[in-house]
Amino acid sequence: MTYPDALQYLYGLQRLGIKLGLENTRRLLRTLGNPERAFRAVHVGGTNGKGSTAALLGAILQAAGLRVGLYTSPHLLDFTERIRVNGEPIGPDAVADLTAEVRAAVEAAFAPVPDELPAHPTFFEVTTALAFLYFARAGVEWAVVEVGLGGRYDATNVLAPNLTVITNVAVEHQDLLGDSLEAIAAEKAGIVKPGVPLVTVAAEPGLGVFRRACAERGAPLLHVPTTYAWRREAPLPDGQVFSLQGAGSERRNLRIGLLGRHQLVNAATAVAAAERLREGGLALPESAVREGLAAARWPARLQVVGERPRILVDGAHNPAACRAVRDFLEEETFGRRLLVFGALKDKDWGQMLEILLPAFSAAILCRPPSDRAAEPVMLLGTAWGHCGHVEVVPDVADALTAARALARPEDTILVAGSLFTAGAALAALRA
């Protein structure tokens, strides 16, 4: 099997959609020899910030000299980004070989037998098994694993982690997770395991749901805002310097290569998680915390990809993330702001535009490269009500070109609305 063959097989499974539940993944992993038991793990869930937090924590563990796996989703430019060991993406040849092996396991474990017709594993279930098999074969000591969707029935919840992290709770995937913050939090609380510590920054009402889940399961809970205080000391062109106090220590001049005050919350959460692992017996020197925070990078999170005009790419795809991005722009940028925006039709793009557009002088509406994309003309009515200059340029690369033609050197262009839009912009800029 070649790498293109592997991608064709894997992406072909997307036709099966999303099926919440763990039995398929457990069955597949048993057939593969339960590779998820070969390493220790931190399980990271939440609505926003879980990818950044996972990347920061993974970098801290790597700086401590550990062999670290990082599993995240979705990818921006290439499938290999989802599965990393010590920061290096899985190679195409490894994807091909492991996909062939996992496909054979699928065919063995899910072959129809009389009176038993199990559902075929989905794209994410197969990809999760592939990632865990790669980590086991690569000799990973610790894996930082991001939840794909929700928590309780996400394929990654087959793990028996040493630590659980839930960043926050906001409205998302209401068709699958529930139509209230309490219901969404209950789904996320499904990754809390008996006796396994939970680190969270969630506010009420989600925090109350997590407290009850931890009490029922005998899991210690650390609420980061209660235990720690953080303050930005200085901005950097591509990051920031901050201080962190709490848990009997004070750290100054910590650096992260991520923009936005919301990333300080993620950094504090990663440090809190590292300290809980240290309390559990893991050797994590203070130097690893500092070096890991400074080394971590997470693309398409207020990523600076151009100057004069300044171009930022962010994967914000829900209202809470858009608020964080708008707060950054209003505090950190000067001149006019121009928005390149493309969203998926099943997202709350109306509220996202209502949050973002008052901060912008012009908006270019585009179509992210996805079958789930919202057509730009659908967004026009909302956009016209909040921004003076609005136009439709369907292709993301062309929309970025149009924004650059409108911008002056002192202006700022933001590309946002979807990780698909962000990925397409990064691909265009790379080309």
Image (tube, rainbow, N blue to C red):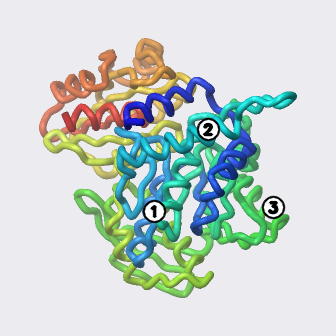
Q: Give coordinates of residue 13: x percent, y percent.
A: 56, 29
> Which label was assigned to residue 172?
2
Local secondary structure at mark 3: helix
Say which element carries label 1.
Answer: loop
* Label number found at residue 138: 1
Few, some or many residues within 10 Å of mark 3 (<14, 14–19, 20+): some
How far across and how far down the image is residue 107, in percent? 64, 35
Q: Is residue 50 above or below residue 358?
A: below
Q: CA distance from mark 2 to mark 1?
A: 34 Å
Q: Is 223 on the left-hand or right-hand side of 70?
A: right
**Disc 1 residue type (three-letter):** Ala
* Amino acid type at image mark 2: Glu
| Contact, mark 2 vs mark 1 (Cβ under 8 Å) | no
Residue 200 lies left or right of residue 299; in this view the side is right
Local packing at callout 1 (Cα closer than 10 Å; few below 14, some 14-19, many 20+) is some
Which residue is denoted by mark 3 in the rendering?
A: 212
Kindly indicate the quadrant of the structure image that contains residue 418: top left
Q: Give the label, 1 or 3, closer to the camera.
A: 1
In the rendered image, residue 164, in percent from the top left (x then y), is placed at: 64, 64
Q: Secondary structure at mark 2?
A: loop
Seen in the picture, residue 266 relative to 347 is either above or below; the reply is below
- Could you tell me which residue is drawn at 83 percent across and 31 percent down? 116
Local packing at callout 2 (Cα closer than 10 Å; few below 14, some 14-19, many 20+) is: many
Residue located 74% across and 63% down the image: 193
